[in-house]
Image: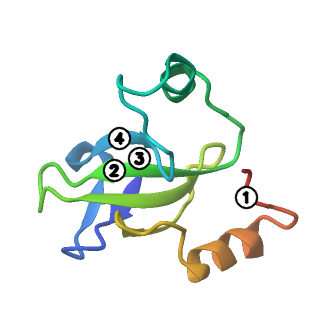
Amino acid sequence: MLTFECPYCGVQADETELSPGGEAHLTRHGPESSDEAFEGYLFLRENPRGVHFERWRHSFGCGKWFLAARCTMTLEVFGTYAAQTTEPPQDILDKITGRRPGWRRLG
């Protein structure tokens, strides 16, 4: 089971208290965008094994959205951070590279 620490209220919450929100750090396109941009947002996503940056909502807690870094192969959670952040914090990137030598962020 996944356990995340909410960066807003500090509660250690397991995945049953949270709602997943998909990939983090995406440029979100609405239906008013070009057909190609909207199609790319909806359907054309990378899905590599390994570390992903995701959006989660503390549904049964403070109700706020936050971002998390986790490995899809081992379910290891590297950390969480505020949803307004445009890039992952350096301490989380250091944890990832320390445990996953040769890892680099795609894109």
Q: Which residue is mark 2?
A: 56
Mark 3–mark 1 distance (CA, rounded to whole Å): 25 Å
Q: Residue furthest bottom?
A: 91
Q: Which residue is mark 3?
A: 1
List x then y, in percent, for residue 31. 35, 22
Above or below, comparing residue 45 to residue 72 in the picture: above
Above or below, comparing residue 51 to residue 16 in the picture: below
Name the residue located 33 percent from the left edge and 50 percent from the top edge: 56
Name the residue located 79 percent from the left edge and 61 percent from the top edge: 104
Compared across the picture, whether 87 is left or right of 8 comes to: right
Residue 105, numbered circle: 1
Q: Nearer the viewer, mark 3 or mark 1?
A: 1
Name the residue located 11 percent from the left edge and 62 percent from the top edge: 62
Q: Secondary structure at mark 2?
A: strand
Q: Nearer the viewer, mark 2 or mark 3?
A: 2
Mark 2–mark 3 distance (CA, rounded to whole Å): 15 Å
Disc 2 to disc 4: CB gap under 8 Å: yes
Compared across the picture, whether 24 is left or right of 47 comes to: left
